[in-house]
Image (cartoon, grey):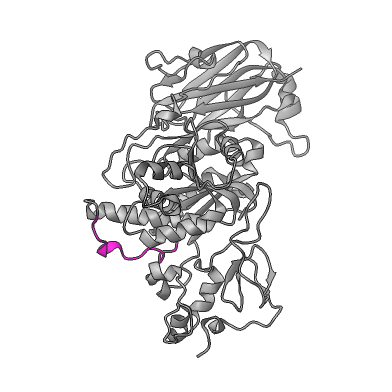
Amino acid sequence: PPPPAAVARERPRGDVVPAGAAAVTDGGCTAGAAGDAVVNPAQECLSDEMRLRSGTVVTAVVLCSVVSVSWYAAFSAQKDEAKLKLWNVTVSKNVLQLPSIFNHLPHLLARENTFLPSVYLGQRRTGVSIVMGVPTVKREVHSYLINTLNSLIYELTPGEKQDCVIVVLIAETDLPYVNSVAENLKHLFPNEIQSGLLEVIAPSVNYYPDFSHLKETFGDPKERVRWRTKQNLDYCFLMMYAQLKGTYYVQLEDDIVARPNYLSTMKNFALQQPSEEWMILEFSQLGFIGKMFKSLDLSLIVEFILMFYKDKPIDWLLDHILWVKVCNPEKDAKHCDRQKANLRIRFKPSLFQHVGTHSSLAGKIQKLKDKDFGKHALHKGHSNPPAEVTSSLKTYQHFTLEKAYLGEDFFWAFTPVAGDFIRFRFFTPVKVDRFFFRSGNIEHPGDKLFNTSVEVLPFDMVQSGKETLLDGKDKFPKYQRTEDGYIRIAYFTNGIAEGEVDPSFGPLEFVRLSTLSDSPVWVILSEIFIKKTET
């Protein structure tokens, strides 16, 4: 019988492989392709010695055990006998039995398109410094995903937004739920998805095996064993997806907040390491939050996790990888710990804090906090123009609007209703360049402003009305006016309102936040920034 490599569809020398596919060489190795590629029968597998450097792009680093989409497409088209040969199940004693992903996930043999995401949003950005993976699942009580993404995105500078990718994995097979989450993210983060900063994926419905026959180990009940087993497969899916997109991969969770400058801090810490022997850089002491890996190491890590994904949770498996690499069984535990410390390096203070209370494991309450993260910043102060501040909202305790405007604390008030307002009247009319308002904070992320507009009242209403409110060509209003003459210039989205002020408005006398409909929750205004135009 022909060797396994010969079973793949024959392709004439020099044929073009479609973009996004993988080349199947005569040697049986697979290599992903970002664009069109020419099949070279003499091509050899890429060497493990290739190393990523910041700012460089590696063509492909793929171990033979990681199956590409096009390989699987060719595989699925063969007869049963050919499939067995491709899976190294053959009666021939002259063929080496190479391990593959099917050894650990044999159910994938009978399924097509298993490695294709069932949902995808994004621009397929590659060549970045850092890829961040955020798995999310359906929680019974409360989802923290939107707050997590807001925190991660808000703390990025414009330059950093071009040098990273945030990948959200909706780790569920309930397609109506998956599609609803994807559509919500598409609605809330259109600019981030369009620019390539944010990608949203979901695994195939056939990706997960049957979890009903898992062995209960370490005293864990069946449901917890299922939860941790699926979690291991979620991490593997994210790592396999991310490995060719950037230099480093950072594992995150969907219930965290980030420190300012977290991305540049992680990148600089990785680049400043005296050697490249490290395997894990830790930016949080909790679980699998804030763990950085070199993308070159992801194939090894995925293989190891898949070998034992049903046996132990992810944090134990990571420690076992380090033990296998550097620990000497003839030495004591202290010697082993010292050796592992060279591969697992901790950064302080922590860059990420866990804020979720309701675990993704149903019924589990966890109040884990990273002590190295420091005190939560519940508000952010700015120097704003002198103004008189008033509000129709009822203030809660000592959290006044005056303190929030001065940057001393946050403003906290009872539930707004339609017609409520927060108003700033400048003592002297001010030319405003831009504005930023943030509602909610880390401890109370849900206390946000909903269906609320930002409105301004120029000092010279006649001048602004002539030059700005009417479009000279079609005579239709360019801005919407309220009944009392204010000009509506922005709305709150995800608890945030920001933007620039049309300079033709001239000096402003008032800035107002107006609630357009009844709110379901209390409101916190944690950041107020009204930036004067520099003269």
Q: Residue 173 in the image: state x and y as whole percent.
A: 39, 59
* Residue 438 part of the magenta segment: no
Task: Please state which of residues 172 and 211 is positioned toward the viewer in this rendering.
Answer: 211
Q: Is residue 496 above or below residue 76?
A: above
Image position of 417 (left or right of 529): left
Span colored in magenta: 204-217
| Residue at point 31%, 65% (across, down) | 210
Q: Name which quarter of the figure residue 435 lies in.
A: top right
Quadrant of the rendering where the C terminus is positioned: top right
Q: Residue 397 in the image: state x and y as whole percent.
A: 37, 14
Q: Residue 445 in the image: state x and y as whole percent.
A: 42, 32
Task: Please state which of residues 341 and 449 is positioned toward the viewer in this rendering.
Answer: 341
Image position of 16 (left or right of 521): right
Image position of 451 (left or right of 287): right
Is residue 485 visible in this depiction of the protein? no
Q: Is residue 116 above or below residue 490?
A: below
Q: Is residue 113 above or below residue 4?
A: above
Q: Residue 296 in the image: state x and y as whole percent.
A: 56, 55
Is residue 343 visible in this depiction of the protein? yes
